[in-house]
Image: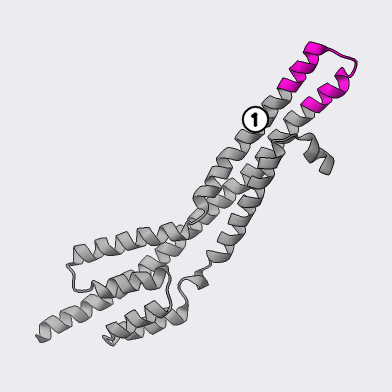
Amino acid sequence: MVDILINGGPVMIPLGILSLVALAIILERLWVLRRGNFMQNATVETLSGLLAGNKFRGAVDYCRRHPGPFTDLVTALVENRRAPYDELREILEDTGRLQLTGLQRGLPALATIVAGAPLLGLLGTVIGMIKIFAVVATAGSGITEALSSGISQALITTATGLVIAIPALFTHSYLEARALSILSEIEAQILDFLHLVREHERDEDEDD
């Protein structure tokens, strides 16, 4: 394996770095993008009880002690609960888009690796072909060994680029879908809270 990597030439160095970066991003996002990290049942039940009891200040304090995409959206909802409905929906949508950016952290870099690794592999192929043509042009006594080296470099770098890009491509798609799924679950719960808060607002208006 070491000989294969060495035969790949200098292009194998950036390819190796890209593979390590991709692996780090994938492992970090797989660890982070778990439902329990964002919307625990205990948190939902606690906030539901506080909002149902009109304890809005307590709900905000709880959210600030437990920061995250879900609690940040709840805070935005509570602090803007008296805003017109359309304006409140817009505020929540803007906050949701901001939270999605956080959930997708690292995925743009992973997408760049998906696109860049095959190109680096192609660069290695071109360098290998240049070596082959140079050997053919000189046609010295070591032509067979030199040709083998050039062909080996061309094939190894191409294969390495694809080996990095293909798993990263599928993992990137999964992680992006996972981030969207988590945000969708959060938004669905926030919508329930919105109706709950609005119901209390209407009750207060009727009492007035």
Looking at the image, residue 125 lies above or below residue 54: above
Say which of 159 and 202 sits in front: 159
Q: Residue 39 placed where, x, y %?
A: 45, 73
Give the residue type at disc 1: Leu
Q: Between residues 31 and 180, which one lies in front from this camera angle?
A: 31
Q: Is residue 153 above or below residue 164?
A: above
Report the residue that reaches farthest toward the right: 141
Region in magenta: 130-150
Q: Secondary structure at mark 1?
A: helix
Q: What residue lies at 36% left-to-right and 66% top-to-bottom?
A: 187
Find residue 118 and report its horizontal and vertical position in percent: 62, 36
Q: Quadrant of residue 186?
A: bottom left
Please indicate, yes or no, whether residue 175 appears anywhere in the rendered image. yes
Residue at screen point 23% across, 73% down: 81
Q: Residue at x 58, y 46 (%)?
A: 169
Using the image, determine if residue 124 lies above or below residue 70.
above
- Residue 58, above or below 163: below
Magenta-drawn stretch contains 79: no
129 relative to 58 in the view: left or right: right
**Residue at the outermost left position:** 208
Tell me if residue 145 is in the magenta stretch. yes
Residue 200 on image: x %, y %: 21, 81
Percent coordinates x, y for residue 50 in the rendering: 33, 85
Check the image and tell me how it is coloured.
Answer: one colour
The 10 Å Cα crowd at callout 1, few under 14, some 14 to 19, many 20 or more, is: some
Instruction: Assign the magenta stretch its main secondary structure.
Output: helix
Which residue corresponds to the image point at 67% horizontal and 25% vertical from the top-left? Answer: 126
Q: Taking the image as drawn, is residue 192 in sight?
A: no
**Residue at label 1?**
123
8 on left or right of 167: right
